[in-house]
Image (cartoon, grey):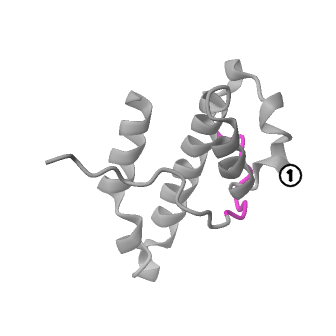
Amino acid sequence: MEFCKRVNGYVTEKEPWKLAKDPANQAELESVLYNTSEALRALAVLLNPVMPATCEILWQSLGANEKLGAIGNQPISNVATWGQLPAGSTVTKTPVLFPRLEAAE
């Protein structure tokens, strides 16, 4: 879970939604989006044994199946190798995979 928290913190800190508003930030935006996509790729592989349906949706949305093969064939030992998704890969929108949980009052 620590990796998930760090990825979330990275996105919150970098604020890609703000970077996208200024063309001068294009290079930084591309870097943030790529690093986030790579982190999601790694998370999909790590969580696939316990959440296969959700991870398959994520894997497909990253375009990883076409570039890297089926998620079930990805060795966990290679998950930390950064740069597996080719630059310029197209990411597609998915439904909300993890709805926000509201704290009980």
Circle 1 packing at 10 Å, graded few (<14), some (14-19), many (20+), is: few
Q: Quadrant of residue 25?
A: bottom left
Q: Viewer-proximal residue, 45 or 27?
A: 45
Asked whether the viewer can see residue 81, the reply is no
Decide whether residue 6 is among the magenta residues.
no
Q: Is residue 100 above or below residue 84?
A: below
Q: For the view shown, which residue lies furthest in the left direction?
A: 105
How far across and down, in percent of the image, does residue 7 sit? 42, 43
Residue 93: name its quadrant: bottom right
- Secondary structure mostly seen in magenta is loop
At 27% from the left and 52% from the top, the residue drawn is: 102
At x 69% / y 54%, what residue is drawn? 62
Q: Is residue 61 visible?
A: yes
Residue 12 is situated, as x and y percent measured from the top left of the image, at: 32, 55
Where residue 78 appears, x then y in whole percent? 70, 24
Which residue is at a point 77% across and 37% down the rendered structure image? 71
Residue 101 appears left or right of 86: left
**Above/below status of 31 relative to 22:** above
Q: Which residues are magenta?
A: 83-91
Q: Which residue is mark 1?
A: 66
Q: Secondary structure at mark 1?
A: helix
Residue type at the position of mark 1: Glu
Residue at 40% of width from left, 81% of height from top? Answer: 22
Instruction: Find the residue positioned furthest to the front.
Output: 105
Instruction: Compare residues 23 and 12 and report the one nearer the observer.
Output: 12
Q: Nearer the viewer, residue 90 or 58?
A: 58
Q: Quadrant of residue 52?
A: top right
The answer to which of 35 and 53 lies nearer the viewer is: 53
